[in-house]
Amino acid sequence: MTRAWRLVEPAQYRTMPWKNGGGTTTELAIHPADGGLAGARFIWRLSIASITQDGPFSEFVGYDRTILLIDGKGAILDFGRNGRAALTDLFAPHDFKGEWAAACRLVDGPCRDFNIMVDRSRGSARTRIVTLDAGAATVVASGMTTVLFALDGAVRAVAPPWMPNIGIGRHAMLRIDAAKDDDSPLPIELSGEARAHLVQIDLRWT
């Protein structure tokens, strides 16, 4: 049982304007690789948004979205008849539909959030927050692609014999891709010397 793995550092991400021009987003990963906001419809996308002012979110019809605060005091998201979400607790995921009209109001200055978007007609994502308290933990990669993103602190990951001990620094991403004929669950050992949080995303699609 093997996987292809790749460590992606923050300097390798690319930053671009929001689809509606109201802010900027840093793209971490997208599938397919030639998908985008203006071209072919992507199946899934991971990104970090920088929110510097009140205003509407971009619309993404047909996508399921998960968002979590990673820096700053956060924001209040108003979805009209679909309710509201207080994006004020660090690393707490909130789910909503990409077609919902979302008005964003900052709480106290700029903030940044981590975003997961999946075309619900073709794929799904399972999101989990992993907390390490100067110890070890085991996570199970169960997606066609699994991503481990270090929210704070530094973490090490290992899955012998196919993946050596890898250091994941703050806001770096470890991407693990399964073989087409073998996407069975695979345990990964995590360790850290101080309290640290990661977000694990298991992605599947057709």
Image: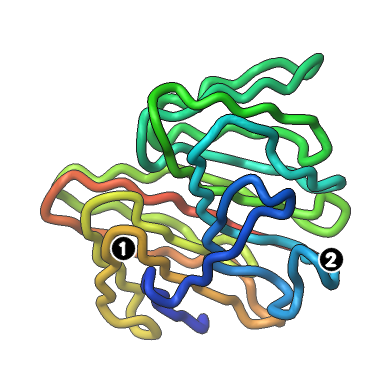
Residue 143, given in percent of the width and then of the height, sits at 61, 63
Instruction: Specify the label residue 68 is tagged with.
Output: none
Label 2 secondary element: loop
| Camera-side residue of 146 and 110 | 110
Is residue 2 among the parts visible in the rendering? no
Q: Which residue is mark 1?
A: 189
Residue drawn at x 57%, y 76% is 177
Nearer the observer: mark 2 or 1; the answer is 2
Q: Is residue 2 left or right of residue 77?
A: left
Among the 4 quarters of the image, the one containing residue 202: bottom right
Badge 2: few (under 14), some or many (20 or more) residues near its Cα, within 10 Å?
A: few
Residue 106, given in percent of the width and then of the height, sits at 49, 26
Above or below, 188 relative to 101: below
Residue drawn at x 62%, y 41% is 66
Q: Is residue 121 left or right of residue 142?
A: right
* Disc 2 residue type (three-letter): Arg
Above or below, 121 relative to 73: below
Q: Which residue is mark 2?
A: 41
